[in-house]
Image: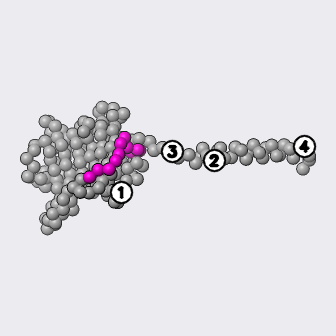
């Protein structure tokens, strides 16, 4: 190499050496998950679907007949401890949908009628279901508006709250998710058209 080129080569090498870490830092910066709202739970849309739509999906004859409140409709399985609950307005429009695995298990497993209620359909529109890991919630919906410890029936839970008011007033406004603290698994989800 000629003597003049050596100086030029040193300056170029130094510049590249200084630029590479800066480029590498930018490429490795974590990308914040985008926030996303939810429109559906258990194949139903709060604020849009009526009780008659729910009965087409989940047979009325398997709903809880002991329920005295006409604004609430439930499907319970005491064998597995799972429940689907709908809260209705005065026109029988679904306002709140809850799926849960926190129902006390009574061991009444002889009657397998609950199999026809399609528990496998108890999933959000974005694919979150009971038993999924808590990490999946953040992947699908971003960071919650608030979260913290909670207790239900003596079980330690982690509560995650999502507010969707940023998406407009014509979509569900709130989603609440509870995860078991010992496993990090989803045990209950609620999607509500009005604010809870």
Of labels 2 and 1, earlier in sequence is 2
Of labels 1 and 4, earlier in sequence is 4
Q: Can residue 49 be seen from the camera position used here?
A: no
Mark 4 and mark 3: Cα distance apart in space: 44 Å
Mark 2 and mark 1: Cα distance apart in space: 34 Å
Q: Secondary structure at mark 2?
A: helix
Mark 4 and mark 2: Cα distance apart in space: 31 Å
Q: Which residue, given by chain and number where applicable, does mark 2 sit on?
A: 24
In screen coordinates, is 88 left or right of 34? Answer: left
Of labels 3 and 1, earlier in sequence is 3
Of labels 3 and 1, the one closer to you: 1
Identify the residue at image location x=90%, y=50%: 1
Of labels 2 and 1, the one closer to you: 1
Identify the residue at image location x=13%, y=52%: 63
Identify the residue at image location x=29%, y=50%: 150
Identify the residue at image location x=18%, y=59%: 104
- Cβ atoms at labels 1 and 4 below 8 Å apart: no
Residue 172 location in percent, x, y? 29, 38
Q: Which residue, given by chain and number where applicable, does mark 1 sit on?
A: 184
Q: Secondary structure at mark 4?
A: helix
Near mark 3 (Cα within 10 A), the count class, few <14, some 14-19 or many ≥20, is few
Of labels 2 and 3, earlier in sequence is 2
In screen coordinates, is 1 left or right of 37? Answer: right
Segment colored magenta: 141-151
* Quarter of the figure with residue 48: top left
Q: Which mark is residue 4?
A: 4
């Amino acid at each position: 190499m000629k003597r003049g080129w050596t100086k030029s080569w040193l300056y170029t090498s130094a510049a590249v050496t200084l630029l590479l870490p800066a480029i590498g830092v930018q490429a490795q910066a974590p990308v914040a998950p985008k926030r996303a709202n939810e429109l559906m739970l258990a194949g139903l849309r709060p604020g849009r679907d009526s009780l008659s739509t729910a009965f087409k999906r989940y047979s009325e004859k398997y709903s809880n007949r002991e329920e005295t409140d006409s604004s609430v409709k439930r499907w319970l399985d005491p064998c597995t401890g799972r429940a689907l609950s709908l809260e209705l307005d005065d026109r029988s429009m679904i306002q709140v949908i809850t799926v849960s695995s926190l129902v006390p298990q009574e061991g009444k497993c002889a009657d397998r009628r609950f199999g026809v209620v399609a528990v496998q359909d108890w999933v959000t529109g974005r694919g979150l279901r009971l038993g999924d890991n808590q990490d999946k919630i953040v992947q699908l919906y971003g960071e919650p508006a608030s979260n913290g410890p909670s207790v239900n029936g003596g079980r330690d839970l982690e509560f995650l709250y999502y507010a969707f008011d940023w998406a407009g007033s014509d979509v569900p406004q709130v989603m609440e998710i509870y995860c078991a603290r010992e496993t990090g698994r989803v045990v209950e989800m609620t999607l509500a058209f009005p604010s809870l």
